[in-house]
Amino acid sequence: MRDDHDAPRNGGHEARSGRVETREERADRKWAELLQEVRVTQTGVQILFAFLLTVAFTPRFQGLGQVDRGIYVVTVLLGAAATGALIAPVALHRIVTGRRLKPETVDWASRFTVAGLVLLLCTVASALLLILRVVVADVTAFWLVAAAVIWFVTCWFVPALWLFHRSRRER
C-alpha cells in the first residue's frame, strides 16, 4: 500500500533506507515479496479448506447437532472466502499484466492478502470451535478459541500495527 515514504524523489526515483529505485522497480520488488508471502498462506489455507470439505463425508458428521452443522457451514464459507482472497492477487496480476499497472496491482494485491489473513484467522477460529465443542464443554471451547484468536492477532497483526505506529511517530 502507498504511504508517505513511497513518494517519488530524485527525479522519479525513490530513496529510503539507502535504496534508490523507480516507482516501477519498487513495485516489482514489492510484488516479488508479496508473492512469497502469499505462497505460504495459500498452501495453508488450501490444505485447511480441503480438510474441511471432507468432514461432511465422514460418518461422525451425521451425528452433529444443528449448532455444530451451522458452525461447520460458516467455517467452510470462511475457508472458501479466505482461499478466494489469497488467490485474488494472482488472478488480478494475470488480468492486468502488460497494462503498466504494477504499482496499483501491488496495492490491491496487498489489500486482498490482508483480507485473506483476516478470513484465515476467522476460519481457524471457527474450525477450532467446531472441533473443541466435540471434545470439551461449550464454555471451555469458547475460552480456548478466544485464547487462540488472541494469540493469532498478537502474532500476525500487533507487531505490524506497533511498527506502523512507531514509524509514524518518528516522522
Image (cartoon, rainbow, N blue to C red):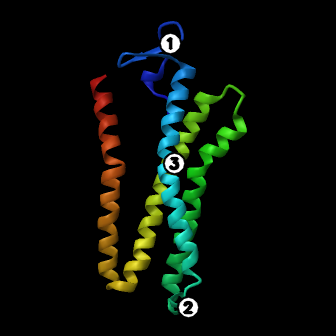
Instruction: Bin the neighbour count of mark 3 within 10 Å (Cα to Cα): few under 14, some 14-19, many 20 and up.
Output: few
Q: What residue appears at the point 32 percent right and 84 percent down from the top-left corner?
A: 136
- Tell me which amino acid carries mark 1: His
Q: Nearer the viewer, mark 2 or mark 3?
A: 3
The residue under label 2 is 62
Q: Please tell me which residue lies in front, 57 or 13.
A: 57
- Tell me which amino acid carries mark 2: Gln
Q: Nearer the viewer, mark 1 or mark 3?
A: 3
Cβ–Cβ under 8 Å for marks 2 and 1 = no
Q: Please tell me which residue lies in front, 39 or 166.
A: 39
Find residue 143 and report its horizontal and vertical position in percent.
29, 73
In which quadrant of the rendered image does the C terminus lie?
top left
Q: What residue appears at the point 35 percent right and 62 percent down from the top-left corner?
A: 149
CA distance separating discs 1 and 3: 29 Å
- Tell me which amino acid carries mark 3: Arg
Q: What residue appears at the point 41 percent right and 67 percent down from the top-left corner?
A: 125
Q: Which mark is residue 105?
A: none
Find residue 166 and report its horizontal and vertical position in percent.
28, 33
Q: Earlier in the sequence, mark 2 or mark 3?
A: 3
Q: Secondary structure at mark 3?
A: helix
Q: Which mark is residue 39?
A: 3
Instruction: Bin the neighbour count of mark 1 within 10 Å (Cα to Cα): few under 14, some 14-19, many 20 and up.
Output: some
The residue under label 1 is 13
Q: What residue appears at the point 35 percent right and 41 percent down from the top-left corner?
A: 160
Find residue 109 and report its horizontal and vertical position in percent.
57, 41
Using the rendered view, name the quadrant where residue 146 is placed.
bottom left
